[in-house]
Image (cartoon, helix red, strand yellow):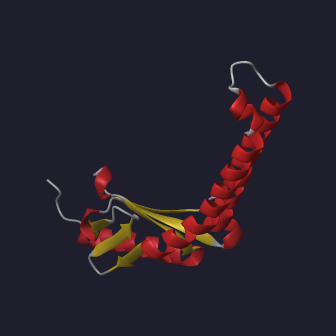
């Protein structure tokens, strides 16, 4: 799903840059230096290689670094490439648990689970769960949060 989403984004970017390159090469505005106008298709080609490589490599790295775990009393999520971020959300502090699907997740039968607390920093999401699992986990977490909720004052 992440690869397809990045490829669609890459194609949109390439179309925009391609149209801009075509317009620059065709109309050759005087405000743009000649060396750019002479090499506009090289710039487009290099950008195309970058965007395509990014669209293919980024999801693979993202898959390797994003992790999650749900225990009896805590939801753990980890993400980040250079700056790794662990989030630990106590089940007793959970206010809402949502599972959502955008159009591409529906195509693949996946969903995103969002666990929210009163603190924005305490909220986390798990992307790419099977839709059935996301619904089951959200219902289970909501039930456990209701059982464990203590007085937050």
Q: Is residue 116 visible to the viewer in this orientation of the structure?
A: yes
Which of the 4 quarters of the picture holds residue 150?
Answer: bottom left
Query: Which residue is at 68% across, 72% downward?
Result: 108
Judge left or right: residue 45 versus residue 128: right
Query: Which residue is at 32% across, 72% downward?
Result: 76
Q: Is residue 16 visible to the viewer in this orientation of the structure?
A: no
Which of the 4 quarters of the picture holds residue 17?
Answer: top right
For the N terminus, the quadrant is bottom right
Judge left or right: residue 129 versus residue 33: left
Residue 98 picture location, percent across and down: 47, 62
Query: Which residue is at 68% across, 52% downward?
Result: 46
Residue 118 picture location, percent across and down: 29, 52
Q: How many marks?
A: 0
Query: Which residue is at 31% across, 63% downward?
Result: 94
Residue 151 picture location, percent across and down: 16, 60
**Residue 49 vs residue 111, the one in the foreground:** 49
Which of the 4 quarters of the picture holds residue 147?
Answer: bottom left
**Residue 39 vs residue 74, the one in the foreground:** 39
Residue lying furthest left in this view? 153
């Amino acid at each position: 799903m992440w690869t397809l989403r990045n490829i669609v984004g890459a194609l949109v970017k390439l179309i925009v840059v391609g149209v801009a390159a075509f317009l620059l090469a065709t109309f050759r505005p005087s405000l743009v230096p000649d060396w750019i106008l002479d090499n506009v298709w090289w710039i487009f080609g290099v950008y195309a290689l970058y965007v395509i490589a990014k669209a293919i490599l980024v999801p693979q790295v993202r898959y390797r670094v994003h992790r999650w775990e749900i225990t009896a009393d805590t939801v753990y999520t980890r993400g980040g490439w250079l700056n790794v971020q662990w989030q630990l959300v106590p089940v007793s502090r959970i206010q809402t648990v949502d599972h959502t699907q955008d159009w591409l997740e529906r195509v693949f039968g996946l969903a995103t689970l969002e666990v929210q607390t009163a603190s924005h920093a305490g909220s986390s999401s798990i992307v790419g769960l099977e839709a059935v699992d996301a619904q089951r986990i959200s219902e289970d977490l909501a039930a456990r949060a209701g059982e464990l909720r203590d007085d937050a004052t």
